[in-house]
Amino acid sequence: MRMPSPFVPCAIALAASALVSGVMATPSAAPARMTQADIIKAAAPSDWRRLDPDNTVVMEVQGKPVIIELAPRFAPRHVANIKTLTREGYYTGSAIVRVQDNYVTQWADPADEEKEKDKLKPLGTALASLPAEFSIAYKGLPLTRFTDPDGWAPVSGFVDGMPVAADPRTNKAWLAHCYGTVGAARSTKPDSSNGTSLYAINGQGPRQLDLNITVVGRVVKGMEVLSSLPRGPGPMGFYDKPEQYVPITRARLLADMPADERPAIEVLRTDTSTWRQLVEASRHAIGGWAVRSALHSNICNRSVPTRDIPSASQQP
Amino acid sequence: MRMPSPFVPCAIALAASALVSGVMATPSAAPARMTQADIIKAAAPSDWRRLDPDNTVVMEVQGKPVIIELAPRFAPRHVANIKTLTREGYYTGSAIVRVQDNYVTQWADPADEEKEKDKLKPLGTALASLPAEFSIAYKGLPLTRFTDPDGWAPVSGFVDGMPVAADPRTNKAWLAHCYGTVGAARSTKPDSSNGTSLYAINGQGPRQLDLNITVVGRVVKGMEVLSSLPRGPGPMGFYDKPEQYVPITRARLLADMPADERPAIEVLRTDTSTWRQLVEASRHAIGGWAVRSALHSNICNRSVPTRDIPSASQQP
């Protein structure tokens, strides 16, 4: 079996790109000796966290869950609106209307796409208009910083498990457009997003979108459901016939799901020394297959591992 | 219609990621004024080139063409072997055996995956063993250089329409792992690839693979066929049941195809001022939607536009 990867299977549910290189957060003098899989295996229980029930949306697409963690720290108004839209059933029965290869998978109210104004889903108590939330203050942000140059921004790292870029000169920090990043689609006006149409990045991170649109979170698990859909034949990857739309059969806030239906996963914390070790290890050729260490990575080249909640801890 | 993109449809068959930012090759003092679509529209006929019939493989997957340009300059031995394998029918009837999300789509002889030695496809006159071809000399390479820092390598740019990284200190240059890059899968030994199993990158460019494996070319068109396949449920995205394999129903060298079956596309040359303009334009917010210029890009963030051959030039 020939492979373009040195990595061996492991019981932990690694996201695919957890298997690619990263950047050291705290450079160490000696190269790391443990493989990424070994570091994850050796992680302490406290290195893992549960999903925040109040800020996680679980969508069902083609019978499979797509788990999205929202980022209230970065886009509080949008996140509040998205939670309202979720709770009031807006996304249930909406659909994926656009899949542009190596760019975005986007969902919306099909009636909005078809310009059928009389069939538009009601917004309920959600707001139709919100301010743009492109960035927040950098100062004071608990950033686990990457030290290799990002190129797109002077500073980069992870906050709350999400890839973040920042510019200390302007005191701005923002969620970066990496694979799986979820944003709120907008039209020409910067403040024209309200969360009724969202997109997830399905290819190389289009970082030029950073600071141009409101990012609301990221897909923690299930991105492959959105990335493996047929590409839309229309301009910019829009599906050009309503029958091509892929229904979102249900969307619920994790907090509103019965306990036995909740996805039983944990996410590795990114404010831990385990995460820093993992990032550092990813810069080195460790484990036999690779012959050359990149000694470099970046925030879009790393993804945050998840695992099934160990069965012992599921017991009351 | 809300969009995470400022770009409007245009008649030219732009690859999806031709719509994302790039890096200036020749910085200009004033920001570019033309949109990328306008620059492509204004390109001269001589800015476009035909596919090289002797170094292009056309695979058919699910009835759709996947067009791969080979890179004889970078991996002459592998490319020669892949051409022999193609001409002698090795890939026809082989299959996609692995799709790992945000990593690779990989194809091979299914019997090799299933360890059915008696059913292995014959190699014919192709070689079973080849030297590793991880890099070539940098000196003298006709590189259209990008000036923004790449991070993964001191020098980066395009050669023969392909993304290339280089290190002048070691006099090495190599094809970079970007979206659509095609490489020759190997096992633990660096010289264990022979082209019988190939992979294409289907997500964020895993640049840590650079200099660790032989890259043989890139998917010029049809990458969405490979990227939208179901992800494999097995470890590292391998399909775990033979019935999941996606057949490659046919693979031919472009030169061996009847004229009326050849894909009638042209590729924008990357050694032109039009390409440099396009790359520079991608660094700027132009055209109304974006409010902020990234003033940065990198080789994996750009893809090379293709277009249908204008009908006039198809006439004898």
Image (cartoon, coloured by chain):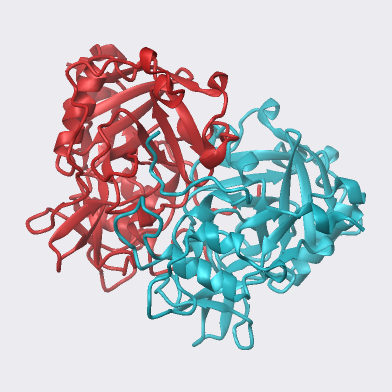
Chain colours: A cyan, B red
Q: Which of A241 and B53 is in front in this view?
A: B53
Q: Can residue B12 be seen in the rendering of this structure?
A: no
Would you say A145 lies left or right of B73 here?
Answer: right
Task: Using the rendered view, name the quadrant where residue A81 is placed.
Answer: bottom right
Above or below, A69 relative to B116: below
Above or below, A1 relative to A278: above
Q: Position of residue B9 (x, y in %)?
A: 48, 42
Would you say B138 lies left or right of A189 here?
Answer: left
Q: Which residue is drawn at 20% across and 29% down?
A: B55
Q: Where is residue A169 in the image (x, y as percent from the top left)?
A: 49, 88
Above or below, B178 relative to A138: above
Q: Which residue is drawn at 46% across and 17% down?
A: B63
Q: Which residue is drawn at 47% across and 47% down?
A: B203
Q: Position of residue B108 (x, y in %)?
A: 38, 26
Q: Where is residue B141 in the image (x, y as percent from the top left)?
A: 11, 54
Which quarter of the figure is the C terminus of chain B placed in? Answer: top left
Q: Nearer the viewer, residue B36 or B306?
A: B306
